[in-house]
Amino acid sequence: MGLISYPILRNDKKRGRGNLTQSNLAIRGEIKNLTQSHEIVKNFILRVISSIIYVALIAGAILPLDKSPVAYLIVFSLFIALAINEVHHFTHDAQTASWLIILLDMLGGIGLFVGVYMLCFDASIAPVTCFIPIAAYGFLRCVVQLYRPRQNAFLSLQRSFFAITYIALPIALMNFIVKMTSPATLLAIFIFIWINDAGAYCIGSLIGKHRLFERISPKKSWEGFFGGFLLTLAAAYALYFYGGTLLQAPRLTLWMGLAAVVPIAATFGDLTESLIKRSLGLKDSGKLIPGHGGILDRIDSLLLAVPAALIYFVITTAS
């Protein structure tokens, strides 16, 4: 009896240990899931707070533009400077980045933005004067490069002029849109971008199956693209009738055309920045904005949406 009961007792102990191990693994799994859930909620809250601050900055800069351009010039000059700084730091090691060249590029980008603003809205200044800041930048940037013999001149100049063209020029072109339409129309372009982003993300997350551009952005889907596009059109139609006066909307056909152009161009803008980051092995352009990455991650859609909207207004105004 004793000989039989001993192995049974030993097996019971093994089973007990096995059950205990399985329980520990289950508990650890639950803790891991709770931790992941907590991180997801935390990141979501950070993204919401960051988005609210970003939207408040944009609205606070654009809406008072008719009365005072101070907030507008400060906010978008800051965006230009921060984005150019990110380009310098993610295209080569931060320790080898020349603070003088970064500062010069920042000032060149801001000079282009302010110069175009003066060209559009200050009739007391001769038009050619408005181009002096960017002309001075081009001259000084090349001269500074002459005194940096250890740097690859072509790559260094390429980085600088790319940053000016990719970031500062589109933001400077916003001034022409404001002059041709109104500050409220510029704000509407931002609203269309935000609605398109939200719609594409939600629809793509729910039913996205067919990849939009898998080589560049594996998570984007055609379902998400059309979801964001159609949601933007629907929102634009509703805004025209319920907020058109506030947004100083043009005639309905022109307004809906803008709502169609912006999501398409914004998607290309998003993909372009994704292409740049992927080629450099990066996930985000920076860590400035909690839950979002860098400032370039926030304005990437804008950088192609603005030129597309300006071309649209030029064509429709001419016709």
Image: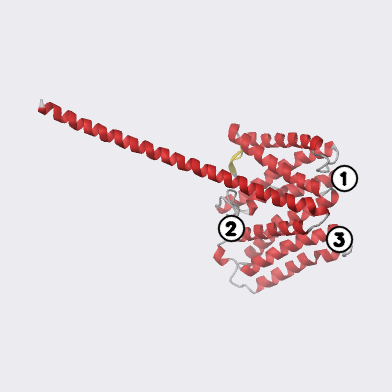
Left or right: 48 in relation to 308: left
**Disc 3 and disc 1: Cα gap in Å?**
22 Å
The quarter holding residue 261 reads top right
Q: Earlier in the sequence, mark 2 or mark 1?
A: 2
What residue did someone put label 1 on?
A: 317
Helix, strand or loop for disc 1: helix
What residue did someone put label 2 on?
A: 90
Up/down of 247 relative to 176, above or below: above
Quadrant in the picture for the N terminus: top left
Please name the residue shown 26% across and 33% down the image: 16
Spot occupied by residue 194 in the image (x, y as percentages of width and height) = 69, 43
Helix, strand or loop for disc 3: loop
Left or right: 127 in relation to 141: right
The quarter holding residue 161 reads bottom right
Helix, strand or loop for disc 2: helix
Please name the residue shown 58% across and 44% down the image: 45
Please name the residue shown 86% across and 63% down the image: 127
Left or right: 227 in relation to 10: right
Quadrant in the picture for the C terminus: top right
- Residue 122 is labelled as 3
